[in-house]
Amino acid sequence: MNIHEYQARDLFEKFGVASPRGKMASTPREAEIAAQELGTEKIVIKAQIHAGGRGKGVFTNGFKGGVHTCSRPEEIREMAAKMLGQTLVTHQTGPAGRMVNKVYVVEAAEIAKELYLAILLDRASSAPVVIASTQGGMDIEAVAAQTPEKIFRESVHPLLGLQPFQARKLAAALGLHGPQAAQAAKLILALYKLFITCDCSLVEVNPLVITKTGEVLALDAKFNFDDNALYRHPEIVALRDFTEEDPREVEASKYCLNYIGLEGNIACLVNGAGLAMATMDIIKHCGGEPANFLDVGGSATKEQVAAAFKIILSDPNVKGILVNIFGGIMRCDIIAEGILAAMQETHLPVPLVVRLEGSNANLGKKLIKDSGLAVISADSLADGAEKIVAAVKAQAA
Ligand code: ADP
Ligand code: MG
C-alpha cells in the first residue's frame, strides 16, 4: 500500500523526522487559505499522486510541472486551479498519467544541497538497508547505473536495529560535518524507527535537503507498506486512497484475491501464483498478451471464484478467458460452480477455454458441460493457451 506525501508528513512529525510545515487542499480556495495560514514568504504547491517525478511531469492539458514555488496566496490559488482535476504524466505514471485530486501547500525550503536517503528491505541480505547518496533530487536509478560509487549502503541488523554509529557513518558519507552531521544522524535514526514501527517495505526521501540556514529537512516522501502487516496498522489502512488504485484490484482485494491488472486481452483465472506466472508465460509464448495475473489461491470458495470471474469480465479489454486449474486442495467442481454462479446473470461475451486437472476434475467438467455454456475444453496447459489465442484471433478476424 502507498500513501500521499501530505499523509507521510504526518508520520514524519509523529516520529520526529524534520520536514517543512504544510497543508493538503482539494480546492483552489482551500489552497489559498492554506498558503495564507502558512504565512511564509515563499510557498510550494505540489500535486498529490502516488508517483514520483512530479517536478518534471507534464499535465495532459500541456501545463508543465507538478511542483511550483509561489510567493502570494492568490498565485497558489491560480496554480491549484491549473492542477486540480487535471491528469499529470510523469516517468513513473506511465503514458495514461494520474488525476490530481489534491495538492499539498507547503513552506518553501531554501535549498543549498539535495541529497538522497532511503530505507528498504534488502531481500539478498534479508535485512533492512539504509541507502544514501549525495546525488539527491534526481533519478536515483540513473545514479546507480552511471555512478554506482556515489551510492552508500548500510545494512541493519534486524534485531539490534540501526545503531547511532551507523547513522553517523551515513551522515559522513553524505559529506556532512558538525551540527549538520548530528542533525542528519538524528533524522536517519528517526526515519528508521518509523520504517520498523509502521512495517514499511520502503521509505524514500528524495530530496533530503540541507538548507541555506543549515537545517536538514526531508522535502519529499515515498512510502510502501507491507500489505501482510497492514492488519497491525488500522491507522495506516485508513490513509488508503482508492482513487489512486486500479478499481479492478480494489474489488479483488475485497475478496482476498491476488489480482494484478495488465494491458493484454487474454484474462487468466488460475490457482497458485507459480501456475499463474506459467500461464501468463505460455499465453505470450503462443502469441497472446495476458490481461491480468490472477491467483484465486488454494482454498477459494465458490463466491471468490464468482467474484474473480466478474472482475475479469468487467475489463473491456478482455477478448478471451483461460481458466487453468490444477486441483490439489482446490477442487475443480468449486471452480466450475464459481464460474457458473458468475455467469448466471449474463451470457458469456468472449471465448472461454477451461483446463481442469486434479481433484474432482471430471465433476467440474461435467458441471460446465451440463450448464450448456459455450466452453472450449483443453487437455493441457499448452493446449489451453493455443486454443484461447486462436479463439481470440479468430474473433478479431
Ligand atoms: P518529485 O520527486 O515527485 O518530482 P519532489 O517533492 O522531489 O517531487 O519535488 C521536486 C523538486 O522540487 C525537489 O527536488 C526540490 O528541488 C523542489 N521542492 C520540493 N518541495 C520543496 C519545498 N518544500 N521547498 C523547496 N523546494 C521544494
Ligand atoms: Mg522527489
Image (cartoon, rainbow, N blue to C red):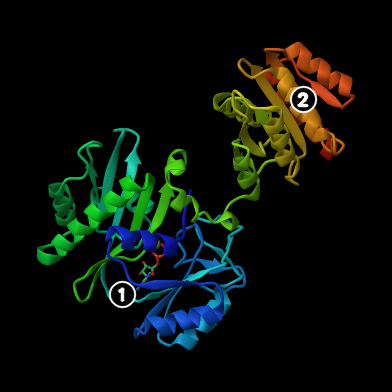
| Residue 147 shows up from this direction | no
Whether tag 2 and tag 1 are in contact, CB under 8 A, the answer is no
Label 2 and label 1: CA atoms lie apart by: 60 Å
Eyeballing the image, is 177 above or below 291?
A: below
**Label 2 residue SS:** helix
Eyeballing the image, is 9 above or below 397?
A: below
| Residue 140 shows up from this direction | yes
Residue 95 falls in image quadrant: bottom right
Q: Is mark 2 within 8 Å of ligand 1?
A: no
State the residue in front, 197 or 314: 197
Q: Which residue is mark 2?
A: 337
Of all residues shown, which one is farthest toward the right? 372
- Numbered mark located on residue 186 in the image: none
- Residue 252 x, y percent position in the rendering: 63, 41
- Numbered mark located on residue 109 in the image: 1
Q: Exactly how many numbered labels are in the figure?
A: 2
- Residue 108 x, y percent position in the rendering: 35, 76
Q: Is residue 212 left or right of residue 41?
A: left
Q: Is mark 1 within 8 Å of ligand 1?
A: yes
Q: Is residue 41 left or right of residue 393?
A: left
